[in-house]
Amino acid sequence: MSLEEYFKRIGFHGSYDKPDLATLQLIHKQHVMSIPFENLSIHCGERNVMDLDAIFNKIVRSNRGGWCLENNFLFGWVLREMGYNTTTLGSRVFNSIINDFGPLESHLIHKVVFDGKAYIADVSFGVSSQVLEPLELISGKDQPQAAGVFRLIDQEGVWVLEKTGRKPEVLNPDFATSSLVNRKETKTIYCFTLKPREAEDFFDKSDILQTDPSSLFTNKSICSLQTPTGFRALIGWTYSEVTFKPEEGVDVLEMRDIKGAEIEQILWEKFSVKLQNKLQPVNNKSFYTL
């Protein structure tokens, strides 16, 4: 594994001899615009593994994406190799169906500290909840980004990430009532503590998320990639292109269902992803929204 290969994968051509905020922001943004958040292996009869060599080969050398236990695991290695003071954390994702956070610390993120300030780096949540740049770890501060205004709130040692977004404008009337469309102006995303975690803490969660019939990742096949104007997503058979229009106070959603024969073409043309095995798309109802 080499940083040079990773930098080529994300299109980063700058200097990295000094671990500063500007470089951290740039590689974070380049990662989410180059490497999809996706769980397609699960729906291709494959397994996701928490092995850095395997993840590097998959994401960097085979031009695939990954879910948080791959993308953020890899990103943590990158940060440490670059000299950043990086601590892995575990977070619990908010489930709107039960109106509470899930029981498992299944979402891997990182705390990065330098110049006396701490930041939360997360390159693998996807869709409209994806931050382009790390968030400063300060309670109650509005941190505007392309997708909306993010804020971290310290609730007696448990930090909660939320986002205030914009109204959805769905162009295709067939999807006006789709469960994939988020209609909440302020959305709770996940919570975490600052207790350090190791990769081993996520091994059992990785297995559960890939096998449990109630898991989001067994109920939906997901591929999402950030763009300069919003993001793209393929959820099951539904392909969406979302354009952020903050000046109009809306997010414009172009949504359509694609046929099986189109899936390979969409994955390649829109996400630069080529699968080795045949994808079986899944889009069962869950709490997940664009």
Image (cartoon, rainbow, N blue to C red):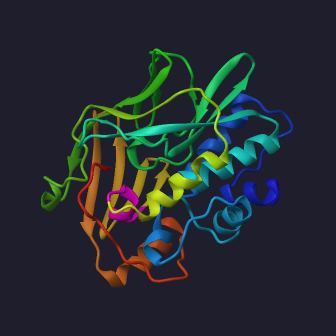
Residue at 78% across, 44% down: 14
Q: How many marks?
A: 0
- Residue 56 left/right relative to 237: right
- The image position of residue 136, as x and y in percent, is 57, 23
Query: Which quadrant of the figure has residue 54?
Result: bottom right
Which residue reaches farthest right?
17
Over which residues does the magenta segment extend? Answer: 214-222
Residue at 36% across, 48% down: 243
Residue at 69% across, 44% down: 76
- The image position of residue 277, as x and y in percent, is 51, 83
Query: Which quadrant of the figure has residue 59?
Result: bottom right
Residue at 59% across, 43% down: 29
- Residue 26 left/right relative to 156: right
Magenta stretch holds residue 215: yes
Mark yes or no: residue 62 visible. Answer: yes
User: In the image, is residue 218 above or below residue 177?
Assistant: below
Mark yes or no: residue 33 visible. Answer: no
Which residue reaches farthest front?
204
- The image position of residue 28, as x and y in percent, is 62, 42
- The image position of residue 210, as x and y in percent, is 46, 63
- Quarter of the image with the N terminus is bottom right
